[in-house]
Image: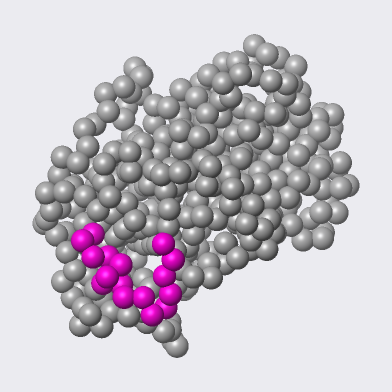
């Protein structure tokens, strides 16, 4: 089987949270046998900002951690038929140009033999619905949504049983507990400031409780404006700037605990979708404390895998308890690791992808290729007490989402397929 993935960037994780999951899944596919090709556009915004922030050395951690992976860049004049030649599956991430998404769909509509999927890992379907509906997905075979709440949005838009829940997960080849424990001190928080959509929550559930508990706090991330830096300074937090995603495990290993503060959209509008940081921290064996969010899909075991705090005062109590009680930390770490390893690794998600591709082909709605059927054997090492995780079951059949391209868009070169 040959899989082609169009990403915003594989090399850069600067303000690009999907990089962790994408790298992990593609690496699992490489080790499982399928041919994997990743494409990213010339001048990718994330890569340009990484190079501006950290120079070429900013790519060292990615290069060292993922020697199996590489990406090819393409320009606006690229021949999409040539880029997808021989592909059984083509997946397009939502952080891509509308014209690219449209023109790959046109290739599929003209008889291209690959299964074409759109991969949505963001809240823009509810925060910027017009921008998302401007993607022309009329010829796509399906949508991969990173949570049930997001999948339901696509169902309301007419996708029915062509939308599949495909959660993010931890790359446990890299994100794992340290082989030897060293000294741990204080808290770590890794996250981008973004667009001021969780400032109050960060102050209530992270900054203020950490200071009251007397715990040092290291903050990593990008896009921190001057007011944000002033706020961190006021609470005594140490801003460390950008950190390569591949370097996060070693950073977690130096700290006592970390805190999950979800963005407001994932609390109020798309409940049940955890950020990648939760998967990362649990996989690395660091105690995790979380601000409120609804685990609507039962992905974890709250109270066992991590601790919820309903308000800042409860967060402070949790921080003190984790700091002072090794008998609390040990079972918390062990439980979180068990859940990740049983249900939420990139290998699990790779197998889910193969499974849903087989289902699509079985329905007769995608080109049939022997390269997909039987591509993998299901793993038989799921611990007792856990059911293998599976994407959301098919819903009622319905028509596909159709939307016109944005005005003034330029297309890619698909003349060879005309």
In what quadrant of the picture does the C terminus appear? bottom left
Q: Residue furthest bottom?
A: 408
Q: Is residue 101 left or right of residue 8?
A: left
Q: Farthest residue to the top: give it.
A: 327
Work out whether 264 lies above or below 211.
below
Position of residue 239 relative to residue 136, above or below, is: above
Query: Which color scheme does this rendered protein use?
Result: one colour
Q: Is residue 319 above or below residue 311?
A: above
Nearer to me, 115 or 178: 178
Is 141 displayed left or right of 370 in the figure?
right
Q: Quadrant of residue 188?
A: top right
The image position of residue 9, as x and y in percent, is 49, 59
In the rendered image, residue 367, in percent from the top left (x then y), is placed at 14, 59
* In the displayed structure image, the side of residue 392 where residue 315 appears, left or right: right
Q: Which residues, given as a range, are shown in magenta?
A: 72-87
Vertical arrangement, residue 248 with respect to residue 117, above or below: above
Q: Which residue occupies 31% across, 72% down?
A: 80
Residue 393 seen from this side? no
Whether residue 159 is visible to the viewer of this picture, yes or no, is yes
Q: Is residue 256 magenta?
A: no
Front one among 361 and 128: 361
Please state the total of marks drawn on the protein image. Answer: 0
Q: Position of residue 329 (x, y in %)?
A: 64, 18
| Residue positioned 36% across, 36% down in the render | 347
Q: Does the segment drawn in magenta span residue 77?
A: yes
User: Nearest the camera: 410 or 299?
Assistant: 410
Residue 37 figure quarter: bottom left
Q: Residue at x 41, y 35 (%)?
A: 345
Q: Residue at x 26, y 46 (%)?
A: 34
> x, y (%) of residue 54?
68, 56
């Amino acid at each position: 089987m040959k899989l082609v993935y169009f990403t915003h960037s594989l090399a850069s994780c600067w303000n690009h949270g999907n990089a962790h999951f994408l790298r992990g899944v593609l690496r699992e596919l490489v080790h499982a046998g399928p041919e994997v090709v990743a494409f990213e556009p010339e001048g990718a915004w994330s890569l340009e900002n990484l190079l501006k922030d950290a120079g070429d050395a900013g790519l060292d951690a990615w290069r060292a951690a993922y020697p199996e992976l590489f990406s090819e860049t393409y320009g606006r004049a690229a021949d999409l038929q040539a880029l997808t030649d021989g592909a059984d599956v083509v997946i397009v991430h939502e952080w891509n140009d509308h014209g690219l998404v449209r023109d790959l769909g046109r290739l599929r509509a003209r008889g291209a033999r690959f299964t074409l999927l759109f991969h949505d890992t963001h809240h823009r379907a509810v925060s910027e619905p017009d921008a998302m509906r401007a993607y022309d997905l009329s010829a796509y075979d399906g949508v991969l949504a990173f949570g049930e709440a997001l999948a339901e949005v696509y169902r309301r838009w007419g996708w029915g049983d062509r939308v599949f829940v495909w959660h993010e997960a931890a790359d446990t080849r890299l994100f794992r507990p340290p082989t030897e424990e060293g000294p741990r001190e204080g808290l770590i928080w890794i996250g981008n400031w973004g667009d001021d959509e969780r400032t109050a929550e960060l102050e209530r559930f992270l900054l203020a409780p950490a200071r009251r508990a007397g715990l040092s706090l290291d903050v990593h991330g990008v896009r921190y404006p001057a007011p944000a830096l002033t706020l961190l300074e006021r609470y005594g937090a140490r801003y460390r700037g950008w950190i390569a995603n591949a370097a996060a495990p070693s950073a977690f290993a130096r700290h006592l605990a970390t805190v999950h503060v979800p963005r407001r959209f994932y609390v109020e509008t798309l409940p049940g979708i955890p950020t990648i940081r939760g998967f990362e921290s649990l996989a690395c064996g660091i105690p995790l404390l979380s601000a409120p969010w609804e685990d609507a899909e039962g992905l974890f075991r709250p109270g066992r895998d991590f601790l919820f705090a309903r308000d800042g005062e409860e967060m402070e109590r949790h921080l003190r308890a984790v700091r002072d009680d090794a008998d609390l930390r040990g079972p918390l770490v062990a439980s979180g690791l068990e859940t990740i390893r049983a249900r939420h690794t990139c290998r699990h998600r790779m197998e889910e992808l193969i499974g849903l591709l087989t289902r699509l082909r079985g329905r007769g709605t995608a080109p049939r290729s022997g390269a997909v059927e039987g591509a993998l054997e299901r793993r038989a090492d799921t611990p007792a007490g856990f059911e293998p995780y599976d994407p959301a079951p098919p819903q009622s059949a319905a028509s596909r989402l159709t939307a016109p391209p944005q005005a003034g868009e330029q297309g890619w070169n698909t003349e060879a397929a005309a």
